[in-house]
């Protein structure tokens, strides 16, 4: 059977790229399985997509927000009906186990339902004026054309985080998904089309970062770049946007830690650490890559973690007994292997894993054994740099204050967690941990869409995804004064 060729979506039309070239999308659990071929877009395609978005924005911004919300609500309903096939496609495309891809789609569902409701909220402020017969308020206005550049690890959820708030606020969008996972993004765009989104409001161009992403980011008609990905790429985007004085929202890396204190429920803590470290094969910006354990329980807790880590099964994410799927590609597997070598050279004690998984069920995929390092010091590279793979470092601490010091000694500040039975220690941690998200007695992963998502330091530039905070990214504030006194009143001058 011939491999299916998927097209770009520009101004309501599915079309081939101007280059006439395509690239292959394969299953990381079985690199012999080709899922489809996608358009290798160039600047010419980006130009057309941005032109379509620019023109459509004139109409879309004037479409009443409740009507925009009705379309997004229809998308939510279709996501519900198509949840399992979307999840199965995603598992084939990026590897994580089916229960996690079902969760990925569920995030898209939750985001769409929540965002649709903002069509009837999108609150501004009404405040008293200091002058008589004068009305004062603020309202939200769309930014304009949004470039949404999304990663491969949450190939439907993260596009939904960007598309839903951008569209409900009256912006138009050009979506450029990661070249490892274009299919999931394309399926989401298909649902927006079926829901009745007008042509040009949402456009999709697939391709590489250099040939597709850079022309999109650099296009002067793009008013806002919303990016999720590596810190290095995000830093480059910030420079490009600053030169043009365009807005940008960056959600980047993490080096997240779980603190386990001596009074913690160790069984609960160990399950949370494993879920945080090896869920999505460690390929989450919120993944737990450091567990900081009070010395009183260090030996016992290490033994519990080691036993459970060794019991985890690698394999195809569509098979129900699989715990850990493949890494997304060979480059990512090489990166993880290199960090395991670095960890051993630095003096970390490799307890288990550290090498690719090449058993019969894994020989044709990019699998890597769940890896546990002990005797890791806070300044080692494996304790400081984002690995984005199934590698967990165990670090000893003296007490909570020492643990907080270790957590905060990082270039990143996305997610943190503390396991303790002491409510006073829990609130001390909440106050002192320098991260955008803190969990108490839960893992570092599992954010809910009705609250802000993002972090401090190298994790982002101050913007937040999700919740009402996302509206601040995709809107400009406009302050409005209505004077019905019939005379010129001079604020701060008239007494």
Image: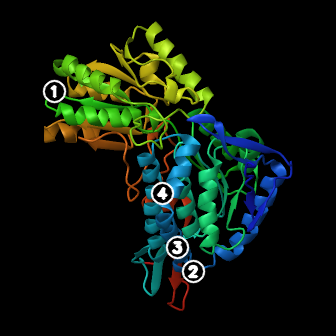
Mark 1–mark 2 Cα distance, whole angstroms, equals 55 Å
Mark 2–mark 4 distance (CA, rounded to whole Å) = 33 Å
Nearer to the camera, 90 or 58: 90
Mark 2 falls on what kind of element? Answer: loop
Q: CA distance from mark 1 to mark 4?
A: 41 Å
Image height of 380 relative to 309, above or below: above
Quadrant for the C terminus in the image: bottom left
User: Which residue corresponds to mark 1?
Assistant: 262
Identify the image quadrant of residue 424: top left
Q: Which residue is mark 2?
A: 64
Q: Is residue 145 above or below residue 319?
A: below
* Badge nearest the viewer, 2 or 4: 4
Mark 4 or 3, nearer chain start: 3
Q: Which mark is residue 74?
A: 3
Q: Which badge, 2 or 3, is on the more N-terminal residue?
A: 2
Q: Position of residue 209 (x, y in %)?
A: 70, 41
Whole-angstrom CA distance, mark 2 to mark 3, is 16 Å
Of circles 2 and 3, which is in front?
3
Choose mark 1 or mark 4, whichever is in front. Answer: 4
Residue 303 visible from this viewpoint: yes
Mark sitting earlier along the chain (2/4): 2
How far across and how far down the image is residue 456, in percent? 44, 40
In the structure shown, which secondary structural element does the residue marked by tag 3 occupy?
Answer: helix
Query: In the visual, does 451 lie left or right of 96?
Result: left
Label ID, residue 84:
4
């Amino acid at each position: 059977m011939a491999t299916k060729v998927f097209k770009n979506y520009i101004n309501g039309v599915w079309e081939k790229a101007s280059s006439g070239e395509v690239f292959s999308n394969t299953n990381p659990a079985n690199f012999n399985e080709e899922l489809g071929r996608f358009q290798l877009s160039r600047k010419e395609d980006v130009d057309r997509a941005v032109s379509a978005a620019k023109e459509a924005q004139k109409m879309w911004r004037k479409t009443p927000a409740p009507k925009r919300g009705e379309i997004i609500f229809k998308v939510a309903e279709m996501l519900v009906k198509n949840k399992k096939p979307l999840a199965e496609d995603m598992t084939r495309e990026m590897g994580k186990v089916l229960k996690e891809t079902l969760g990925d789609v569920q995030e898209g569902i939750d985001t769409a339902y929540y965002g649709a409701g903002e069509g009837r909220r999108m609150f501004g402020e009404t405040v008293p004026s200091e002058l008589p017969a004068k009305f004062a308020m603020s309202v939200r206005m769309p930014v304009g054309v949004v470039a949404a550049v999304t990663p491969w690890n949450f190939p439907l959820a993260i596009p939904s985080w960007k598309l839903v708030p951008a569209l409900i606020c009256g912006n138009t969008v050009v979506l450029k998904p990661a070249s490892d996972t274009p299919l999931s993004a394309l399926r989401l765009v298909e649902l927006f089309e079926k829901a009745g989104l007008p042509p040009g409001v949402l456009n999709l161009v697939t391709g590489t970062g250099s040939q597709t992403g850079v022309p999109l980011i650099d296009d002067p008609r793009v008013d806002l770049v919303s990016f999720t990905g590596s810190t290095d790429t995000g830093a480059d985007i910030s420079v490009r946007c600053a030169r043009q004085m365009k807005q940008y929202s960056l959600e980047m890396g993490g080096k997240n830690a779980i603190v386990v204190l001596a009074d913690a429920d160790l069984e609960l803590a160990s399950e949370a650490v494993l879920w945080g470290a090896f869920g999505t094969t460690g390929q989450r910006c919120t993944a737990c890559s450091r567990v900081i354990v009070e010395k009183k329980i260090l030996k016992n807790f290490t033994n519990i973690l080691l036993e459970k880590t060794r019991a985890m099964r690698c394999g195809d994410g569509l098979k129900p007994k699989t715990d850990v799927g493949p890494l997304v590609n060979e480059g990512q597997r090489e990166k993880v292997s290199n960090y395991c070598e670095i960890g051993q050279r630095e003096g970390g004690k490799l307890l288990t894993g550290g090498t690719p998984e090449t058993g019969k069920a894994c020989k044709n995929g990019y699998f890597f054994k769940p890896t546990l390092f002990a005797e890791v010091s806070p300044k080692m590279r494996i304790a400081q740099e984002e690995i984005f793979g199934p590698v967990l470092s165990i670090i000893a601490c003296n007490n909570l204050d020492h643990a907080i010091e270790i957590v905060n000694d990082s270039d990143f500040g996305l997610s943190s967690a503390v396991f303790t039975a002491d409510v006073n220690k829990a609130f001390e941690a909440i106050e002192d941990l320098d991260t955008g998200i803190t969990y108490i007695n839960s893992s570092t992963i599992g954010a809910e869409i009705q609250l802000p998502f993002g972090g401090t330091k190298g994790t982002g530039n101050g913007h937040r995804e999700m919740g009402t905070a996302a509206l601040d990214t995709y809107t400009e504030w406009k302050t409005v004064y209505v004077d019905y006194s019939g005379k010129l009143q001079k604020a701060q001058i008239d007494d």
